[in-house]
Image (spheres, helix red, strand yellow):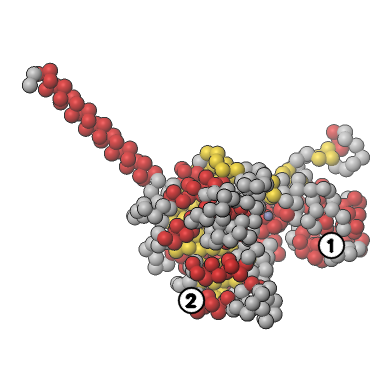
Amino acid sequence: MTQFFRRSLACAVALSLLVGGWLVIRAGAAQSQSAPPKYVFLFLADGGGIAHLEITRQYNRQVYNEGMVISDRIMKEGSVGLMTTHAANSLSTDSAAAATALASGCKANIGALGVCADGSVPSTVMEQAKKRGMRIGLVTNSTVYDASPAAFVCHVPNRRHFASIIDRYLELEPDVILGGGKEHFVPKGQPGSRRNDETDAIAAFQKKGYQKVSNKLELERTSGGKLLGLFSDKEMSFEIERKKDSEPSVYDMTRAAIRHLHDDNPHGFFAFIENENIDTASHLSDIAAVIHDYREFDRAIALAYEFYKKYPRETLILVTSDHETGGLGFTMALKDLSSTRSDNQAAATNADLKKLQAITISLQQASRILGPAPTEEGVDKLMREHFSGFTLAPEFKQAIIARKPPSRTLYIDPTAHALGLMIANNTQAYWQTSSHTNNPVAVAALGVGSEQFKGYYDNADFGKKLLALLDDSRTLLRR
Ligand SMILES: [Zn+2]
């Protein structure tokens, strides 16, 4: 062997060791970057767009001098992404098609749950989690069989097949089911039932070992085992008027869910936690109700953040939305319709934001109080009792009494929308529509795998990313 050849060989060996070492390091880095999370929290602000979050953030700052966990912790310490939300057959989606995309990684048609637009029926992220041996939990202040939670474990062509959804829950046995909707659990013969058969679904869950609770106190006393909580016949109350002693909030339900999913469990969990009222309030042009519910939602996320601080190498927190509802935003507007001159224009200020504190009920409740035939006296009394400091312009008062939609795009509840426009007129927080928009929504992610959720992508890609993270061929990261 010549000197030259020996040197060349030594160089080649050194180089291959270097390259090999680099490859091992890269592989290790790639593995640690995408190691599967043991604990997954998916928080969904139904209907919550970036404006909803930003208005709540500013309200918290101005009124309480407080920050928000979503913006100050999850977004600043983790990753932020922007996600498109259209359905396969519509530019503005519904919760069913959107949740199907998030849960199954495919585009779906409006109304479809866990069924893709091409007819295929893929596994959901939660079914994947269950296969991995993780506990699973569904928490919402809507009915527990509403589209968003249901899309994570069900495959039905129509979101209104409630009995089929409950049957699927019984089959899959999620460890925690908390929310409203008792009316589809009780048999046809019982008062308040909306079922078409004599099935006692609550008894069926109890037979499978579930503890059943129906109020806040009972929920606080539970420990260990599978849990079914049904806290109202239909959807649960708006936070602004919730009976704080008896009805749990999303925060209370999240606390119980973490206890049940985590205690005495070496296999991890996947918790889906939704605030549906952000969407419902937005359909009704109700900015005050949105803010109260968003604040409580953020408190629930604070519980997950505390959990993450204890298990940072094993926890993934995702906070997102299925779509934006209402086309909400502070803007400039005319003070009245007398002129378009600059001295008749108003821009939103912090003082406008603070005015919202005075509102004591949801617009849904205001609409109920005024009933189907509102009177002038009734409207005046409502304004005095629940909208102190607000002025009702004559055109909105007339719209309420006539029960006419105040615009082409605001039509679901004329009373609520006219009051919503009254609030807008006083604060400049305007609504574009009473329905869903195609605005992209934010994805905030913190913890194991959070870097996957950076950037700009479609909601079906969100589902694909989560499915890949929870792929059962990959081993669970251990501490
Ligand atoms: Zn909606």
- Mark 1–mark 2 distance (CA, rounded to whole Å): 48 Å
Residue 296 appears in view: no
Mark 1 residue element: helix
Residue 131: mark: none
Percent x, y for residue 64? Answer: 64, 52
**Figure quadrant of the C terminus:** bottom left
| 143 up-or-down from 33: above or below | below
Of labels 1 and 2, earlier in sequence is: 2
Report the amino acid beneath label 1.
Leu
Q: Considering depth in this image, is 90 or 202 the residue closer to the camera?
A: 90
- What residue is disc 1 on? 382
Residue at image x 78%, y 39%? 332
In contact (CB < 8 Å): disc 1 and disc 2: no
Horizontal side, residue 293 vs residue 226: left or right: right
Q: Considering depth in this image, is 356 or 159 the residue closer to the camera?
A: 159
- What residue is disc 2 on? 208
Report the amino acid beneath label 2.
Lys
